[in-house]
Amino acid sequence: MKKIISGKVREVYDLEDGRMVIVTTDRISAFDVILPTMITDKGKVLNALANFWFDYTKDIVKNHMISSDLKDMPAEFQKPEFEGRTILVKKLKMIPYEVIVRGYMFGSMYEAYKKGEPFLGHKFDKEYKQAEKLDEPIVTPSTKAAEGHDINVTLQYMKDDLGEELGTKIEKAALAIYKKCYEHAKANGIIIADTKFEFGLDENGELVLGDEVLTPDSSRFWDASKYEVGGSPASYDKQFVRDWLKANNLAGDPNIKEIPAEVVAQTAAIYKECEKRICHNG
């Protein structure tokens, strides 16, 4: 067994038998900096949400999950500190794209729209306000860069690269997952404005959903009760930490010493509220 990835949040171990163990830590990153203070139980929340969604969408596309039971893991992981934050998964040949599904006019898409420019091949014929729901969600992939920032590309670019058949299969799977999960979240007071998926191919060349899925770290979750068109809705993610960093001129500063306890507590509460709504309602 060897550790192959130590990411911003996750540690990935290759069991060298076609399986991997993924541990989701309580680390938090903002503005491309891993912050020095952990967010209590954040890893458990992200893990619970991803596991819920993997199970919820397995009728649409297969996923990489084998087990979340520590008894199924190597002995090194059968310890209390790994409980609730560790999964055993099938190793995939990962497709080198993040597949972003956007359901609302927001962020960089809104910036392009305001200038009257198409956004990654998408043109908008009707008028939209900031944070308004699109008539239909759209897929905008990005290339996964080993270093530096991912590069946004058009859907056709991905299809040309991967082949029309696989590219279309990915597009359809991403939209179907988003739509099904959007309805569940909306019924429980959360709007999934956008999210990113990662897919891979298994040993038979079948499409499989991997990485994490529909967590506040990989998605933009809005509180439906506070949502209104025309502004920037309240979100269930690390926005609270980002706002604190900005207010204290620490955004992107790699020398931050610590995050105040009250900011940690409020951020942890936001993550837990999100898990409670999605996993334990309906």
Image (tube, rainbow, N blue to C red):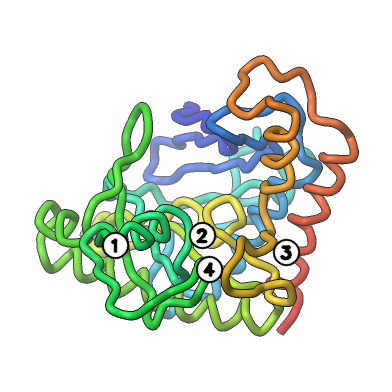
Q: What residue lies at 25% left-to-right and 61% top-to-bottom?
A: 118
Q: Earlier in the sequence, mark 2 or mark 4?
A: 4
Q: What residue lies at 63% left-to-right and 47% top-to-bottom?
A: 86
Residue at mark 3 to residue at mark 2: CA–CA distance: 13 Å
Q: Earlier in the sequence, mark 2 or mark 1?
A: 1
Which mark lies nearer to you, 4 or 3?
A: 4
| Residue farthest top in this picture | 255
Please give left or right for residue 222 compared with residue 273 in the image: left
Question: Label 2 neighbourhood size at 10 Å, few (<14), some (14-19), many (20+)?
Answer: many
Q: Are the residues at dot 3 and dot 2 in contact (C-beta closer than 8 Å)?
A: no
Q: Which of marks 4 and 1 is nearer the N terminus?
A: 1
Residue at mark 3 to residue at mark 1: CA–CA distance: 38 Å
The residue that label 4 is drawn on is: 131
Which mark lies nearer to you, 2 or 4?
A: 4
The location of residue 93, given as percent across then percent down, is 28, 47
Describe the element under mark 2 as helix, strand or loop.
loop
Q: Which mark is residue 213?
A: 2
Please give left or right for residue 48 compared with residue 273 in the image: left
The residue that label 1 is drawn on is: 116
The residue that label 3 is drawn on is: 275
Residue at mark 4 to residue at mark 1: CA–CA distance: 17 Å
Q: Are the residues at dot 2 and dot 4 in contact (C-beta closer than 8 Å)?
A: no
The amino acid beneath tag 1 is: Gly
Question: Label 1 neighbourhood size at 10 Å, few (<14), some (14-19), many (20+)?
Answer: few
> In the picture, residue 126 is in which quadrant?
bottom left
